[in-house]
Image: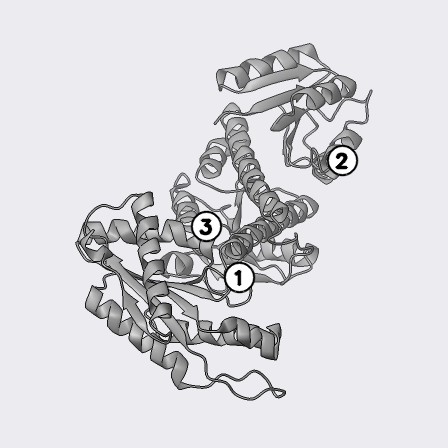
Amino acid sequence: MTGRILIVDTLPTNRIVLKVKMLAAQFKVDACGSRLEAEAIIARDRPDLILINLSDQAEDRHGFCRELKESSDTAAIAIISVGIADTARARFAALDAGADDVLPRPINDALLLARIRSLLRVRHARQELMLRDGTSRALGFEETRSGFGAAARVALLSHSALSGRQLAEKLDSGLTLPVLRLETDRILSTSSVTPVPDLFVIDGTRCTDGGRGLFRLVSDLRSRSETRTSSIMVVLPDDEPEIAALILDLGADDVVSKSVSKGELVLRAKALVHQKLLHDRLRNTVRDGLQAAVTDPLTGLYNRRYVEPHLARIAEQAQATQREFAVMMLDIDHFKSINDRYGHAAGDKVLIEIAHRLRDNLRAIDLVARIGGEEFMIAMPRTSGEQAHAAADRVRQLISAQPFSLGVDHPMITVTVSVGVTTGGLSRLDRGQINGMCGQADAALYAAKSAGRDTVAMSNFATA
């Protein structure tokens, strides 16, 4: 995995050693000895991750980390504290200042590189989600929501009742949310996990098989669709850097040792829950924005933007299966007179009701879209000309048979539609030919209008 790393350490020897290791791992590397130099490098070439020695007494390095995390421009930069004293107080102070992890010297190279890869994966995922979120908001699809909604869920997985109870006590006393106790074997033997936790804390302190069971569990949670976005923290015996490195590479978000203090454990757990909920919110914003991009806000039907790529997929399927597909253009007769006589709110009611009737009376595989003011498109895969004509006539009748309600201030009215139909797809259709097919359906629609409205007309595109 490529990325840019900044090393901040007062001692030249420390900088050189770390730089050589990072260059050997194919990272781009900058190194400096002071906060002022670091700020200049960040402004010039923003790093993806910073390796910083927080033990330097000449500068307020903790304050520097805190400022980086509080600024929207640099908050996404991952930070690993290196070189501090391996005490509970020093570790907590580093994490509280904004460090994503703490690796005291001597640093295990495999664990350091695995931790870097893990943090960069998270950073890149967040960057992509934030980019898509920004695009959605720039297009006006949806504003970013504040807050995280429902309360978070934490689950503790353990083989041992004793060690599991000790971890649960630490988490329960520090987190302001309940911790669900689950048996590891039960998770592995069931096909689903409900409700899905936002954070899994895995008790691996009693692993006696070289970590194989933990590797299987982490891989299993990451492979399931319902748990693959959950955060995972694994608690390991002290002095197991090789197992920790492998677990991080398998997808765990954090590893801590058995001797971790309650304060550090809770701080790390809170950070992982926040990370997971942030990613959920970004994913939901992207999903909702994309949905808004292709959906007509009045009727809930797909809009013209969605039609073109979907028609291309239908055409590919038709050519592959040698089954025709149909395209219908449907237009409300005398719609302008409805708006003029009863008002645009009444016209909107008609559009919404027609959308309901179309959706409720066509197949799930059929595409129903609003492509203009009072014009709708229906695309029907695996449909012959005869079947398409019958379907179009059925749609026409179901709209005219039942009067439309315009509200308490207006009488019920009868609404009719005209429909133009064409079929094709046995031969390969390029984008221009698909557009031509839609044009043929439009021409058939105008023929239906000219024939007196409330009727169906077919085109001859089926032979094209």
Residue 67, given in percent of the width and then of the height, sits at: 77, 34
Amino acid marked by disc 3? Arg
Q: CA distance from mark 2 to mark 1?
A: 34 Å
Closest to the observer, 138 or 29: 138
Circle 2 or circle 1, nearest the eye: 2
Mark 2 is on which residue type? Arg
- Badge 1 is on which residue? 181
Looking at the picture, which amino acid does disc 1 mark? Arg
Identify the element where label 3 is drawn. Answer: loop
Are discs 2 and 3 less than 8 Å apart at CB? no
CA distance for labels 3 and 1: 19 Å
For the question of whether residue 162 can be seen, the reply is: no
**Residue under the image location 29 percent in, 46 percent down:** 433
Q: Is residue 68 left or right of residue 239?
A: right
Q: Which residue is mark 3?
A: 228
Q: Position of residue 93 (x, y in %)?
A: 74, 37
Judge whether 20 appears above or below 362 on screen. Answer: above
What percent of the width, then of the height, locates residue 330? 39, 67
**Residue 66 image label:** 2
Say which label, 2 or 3, has the lower sequence index. Answer: 2
Q: Nearer the viewer, mark 3 or mark 1?
A: 3
Image vertical order of residue 312 relative to residue 154, above or below: above
Front residue (pair 319, 32): 319
The residue drawn where x is 46% and y is 50% is 228
